[in-house]
Image: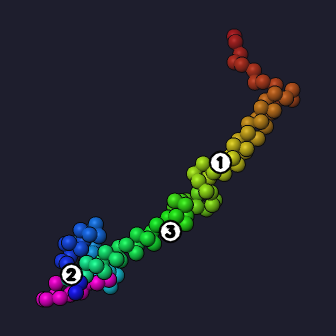
Amino acid sequence: MAERIAIRRAAAICGVNPRTLRAHAERGEIPGAARLFDGYLTFDEAKLRAWISEREEAWQETSTASQGVASGTPAYKLGGANTAEVYLQLISPKQESDLKRNSRALNKSASPANPATPGPKRS
């Protein structure tokens, strides 16, 4: 028969506050949770640990699948394999547009049709 544990021990195993664990258990989200003996909430330790292991494995698969890139970030949207590639994808268009803008500005100031602005008049 599986050993049942109190909510404080179960919360410590999960690394959460007992109130948080109680709320999830009351919504039926925690396997092995049951009210026994005068309504005390207890947990099947083996089922709780197995559930945590399953969630850890699912998290690892999700993290590996996205290559450590968080959903919603530019890296995720661009599909870069690593941060350096994404950085280059993000700044390359910006650098090109800046170079073109600066080049046009230099060409305008150097053309004879637009002489340099004269300095202040001296009296």
Q: Position of residue 34 (x, y in %)?
A: 24, 86
Residue 114 to residue 21: above or below = above
Q: Residue at x 69, y 43 (%)?
A: 95
Tell me which label, 1 or 3, sits earlier in the chain: 3
Residue 115 falls in which quadrant of the image?
top right
In the current view of this chain or complex, which residue is farthest to the left? 38
Res 88 label: 1
Q: Position of residue 10 (x, y in %)?
A: 24, 74
Q: Are marks 1 and 3 in contact (CB under 8 Å)?
A: no
Tell me which label, 3 or 2, sits earlier in the chain: 2
Q: For residue 108: magenta?
A: no
The image quadrant where one finds the N terminus is bottom left
Q: Range of the magenta residues?
A: 31-40
Q: CA distance from mark 2 to mark 1?
A: 55 Å
Residue under pointer 3: 62
In this rendered view, identify the residue nearer to me: 75 or 118.
75
Residue 121 falls in which quadrant of the image?
top right
The image quadrant where one finds the C terminus is top right
Marks 2 and 1: which is nearer the front? Answer: 2
For the question of whether residue 91 can be seen, the reply is yes
Q: CA distance from mark 1 to mark 3?
A: 25 Å
Q: Position of residue 6 (x, y in %)?
A: 18, 77
Q: CA distance from mark 3 to mark 2?
A: 32 Å
In this rendered view, identify the residue nearer to me: 36 or 116.
36
**Direction from residue 3 to residue 60 in the image, left or right:** right
Residue under pointer 2: 3
Residue density around tag 1, few if under 14, some if 14–19, many if 20 or more, within 10 Å: few
Q: For residue 37: magenta?
A: yes
User: What residue type is disc 2 on?
Assistant: Glu
Q: Residue at x 28, y 79 (%)?
A: 46
Tell me which label, 2 or 1, sits earlier in the chain: 2
Q: Secondary structure at mark 2?
A: loop
